[in-house]
């Protein structure tokens, strides 16, 4: 067996700087300014998953603990967008 490194970096096209990310089953998280910061955030991420009881489906049962929770005020109040302030050319 081999272990894939979950932390990786890539160069940002806009700034030219290296940005660090970590990969999890839930997606790719980042960017972080250093590999150390990405590593620390990965540790925090794993600990949060453990504390919430979310094993990312490793036990074979359906686990709905990692879901999007609705925002209460969004249910009751309409959100209006001013389309006249949007960036031109994006349709």
Image (spheres, grey):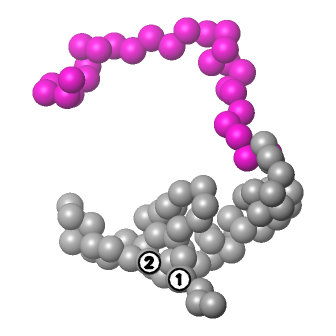
The residue furthest bottom is 1
Left or right for 88, reference 68? left
Q: Position of residue 82 (x, y in %)?
A: 34, 13
Residue under label 2, please give it.
8
Q: In which quarter of the image is residue 47?
A: bottom right
Q: Are marks 1 and 2 in contact (CB under 8 Å)?
A: yes
Describe residue 49's horizontal placement relative to residue 85 as left or right: right
| 68 and 34: which is toward the camera | 68
- Quadrant of the snapshot with the C terminus: top left
The verdict on residue 22 being magenta is: no
The residue singled out by tag 1 in the image is 5
- Above or below, 2 against 31 in this view is below
- Picture quadrant of residue 87: top left
- Quarter of the image for residue 45 reads bottom right
Residue at 20% x, 61% y: name it.
14
Residue at left offset 83%, top offset 61%: 59
Q: How crowded is mark 1: few (under 14 residues within 10 Å), some or many (20 or more)?
A: few
Q: Residue at x 69, y 27 (%)?
A: 70
Quadrant occupied by the N terminus: bottom right
The CA span between labels 1 and 2 is 7 Å
Most distant residue in the left direction: 89
| Prevalent SS, magenta region | loop
Image: magenta residue range: 65-91
Q: Does the magenta stretch include residue 68?
A: yes
Dot 2 lies on which element?
Answer: strand
Left or right: residue 32 compared with residue 1 = left
Residue drawn where x is 54% and y is 76% of the image: 6
Image position, residue 52 (x, y; %): 84, 55
Can residue 34 be seen in this snapshot? Answer: yes
């Amino acid at each position: 067996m081999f272990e894939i490194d979950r932390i990786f970096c890539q160069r940002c096209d806009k700034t030219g700087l290296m940005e660090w990310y970590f990969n999890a089953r839930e997606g790719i998280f980042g960017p972080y300014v250093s590999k150390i910061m990405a590593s620390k955030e990965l540790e925090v991420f794993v600990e949060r998953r453990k504390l919430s009881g979310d094993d990312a489906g490793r036990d074979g049962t359906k686990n709905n603990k990692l879901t999007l929770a609705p925002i209460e005020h969004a249910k009751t109040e309409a959100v209006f967008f001013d389309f006249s302030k949007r960036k031109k050319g994006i349709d």
